[in-house]
Amino acid sequence: MWLRFWNGLFKRLQLRESWVIFFALGTIMLNYPFVQIFNRTDTVGGIPLLYLYFMGGWVISIFVIYLFTRASSLSGDHQDEGEQR
């Protein structure tokens, strides 16, 4: 079950449109309305909410880039296998 899920996810991440969508979402995340929402004096565990927002977005973007690189390396492996036959 999980293998089918990951294979489907990696196939979808190989599309050029998904790269553009995630880039646009990352750019929107750093613009005025979203930054203003989290620019408060509230803290979570003593850490300002804006810092947590930026650090959380940073971690998520690194994870998405990791998924993209895994998907592209898997597609490259399959193409190499097809060329060797």
Image (cartoon, rainbow, N blue to C red):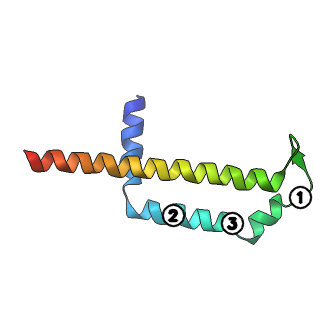
What residue sits right under mark 1 in the picture? 40
Q: Residues within 10 Å of mark 2 (few under 14, many from 20)?
A: few
User: Which circle's residue, 3 or 2, is located before the other in the chain?
Assistant: 2
What residue sits right under mark 3 in the picture? 30
Residue in front for this viewpoint, 5 or 34:
34
Q: Foreground mark, 1 or 2?
A: 1
In which quadrant is the C terminus drawn?
Answer: top left
Q: Secondary structure at mark 1?
A: loop
Give the number of callouts.
3
What residue sits right under mark 2 in the picture? 21
Whether tag 3 and tag 2 are in contact, CB under 8 A, the answer is no
Could you tell me residue 77's position as x and y percent? 24, 46
Q: Secondary structure at mark 2?
A: helix
The residue at the point 65 percent across, 67 percent down is 28
Q: Which mark is residue 25?
A: none
| Residue with the most extreme left position | 85
The residue at the point 81 percent across, 58 percent down is 38
